[in-house]
Amino acid sequence: MSKLFKIEGDQVVARDDPFVALADDEIALPTPGSGALGAVILSFARFQKEGEAWLGQGAQIGVRLKPDEPVEGLAYDLPRLALVALAFPKFRDGRAYSAATLLRDRYKFAGEVRAVGDVLRDQALFMVRCGFDAFEPADGSTVDVWAHALHRFRHVYQAAADRRPPAFVERARASASGGAA
């Protein structure tokens, strides 16, 4: 099982990953009536070809999107998906941030949004602000290190998918209540 960190409330916790990522050529599609399957993550291309059949078997389905694959292509199926795994092929490629924001804000996706690939603790706070709630860290870091990275800064300066109030809102609330921010 892969190393998986999840955000639960205000905490970062390590969890066993119940999902198995299937390669496009790994397992043949189950035959109809063969019973419920476990939790699988399919590539976007495989999901487009076989998604209905997998969903019809009762499996929990996740879809892995590469940075150049459109989130919009999942819009219809999002209510039936358990997770969307967004790939970071390298540290400098930030397209998955935009995809996570679209999933949370535009499509109101309530399932798990997972960061996979070159996922580093330096990105943790930014990922959470965009809507990620699960991570497969690539840098060998621990839960404690990730928790520290997430709580490193007390204030944020703009609204985002994590719904933390920006500093100007905190200041206004403090002024209205007679306190200091």
Image (cartoon, rainbow, N blue to C red):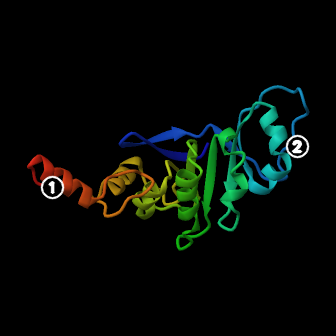
Q: Amino acid at mark 1?
A: Ala
Instruction: Report the number of numbered marks.
Output: 2
For label 1, the residue is 181
**In the figure, 105 relative to 98: above or below?**
above
Helix, strand or loop at disc 2? Answer: loop
Residue 44 falls in which quadrant of the image?
bottom right
Which residue lies at the image location 39% right of the left edge and 53% below the top edge?
A: 146
Q: Nearer the viewer, residue 57 or 102?
A: 102
Could you tell me if residue 154 is visible in this image?
no
For label 2, the residue is 28
Between the C-alphas of marks 1 and 2, the distance is 58 Å
**In the figure, 100 relative to 1: above or below?**
below
Q: Amino acid at mark 2?
A: Ala
Q: Nearer the viewer, residue 57 or 103?
A: 103
Nearest-to-viewer mark from 1 and 2: 1
Which residue lies at the image location 81% right of the left edge and 52% below the top edge?
A: 48
- 144 relative position to 17: left or right: left
Helix, strand or loop at disc 1? Answer: loop
Position in image of residue 126 (x %, y %): 43, 61
Q: Quadrant of the C terminus?
A: bottom left
The single residue placed furthest to the front in the displayed view is 176
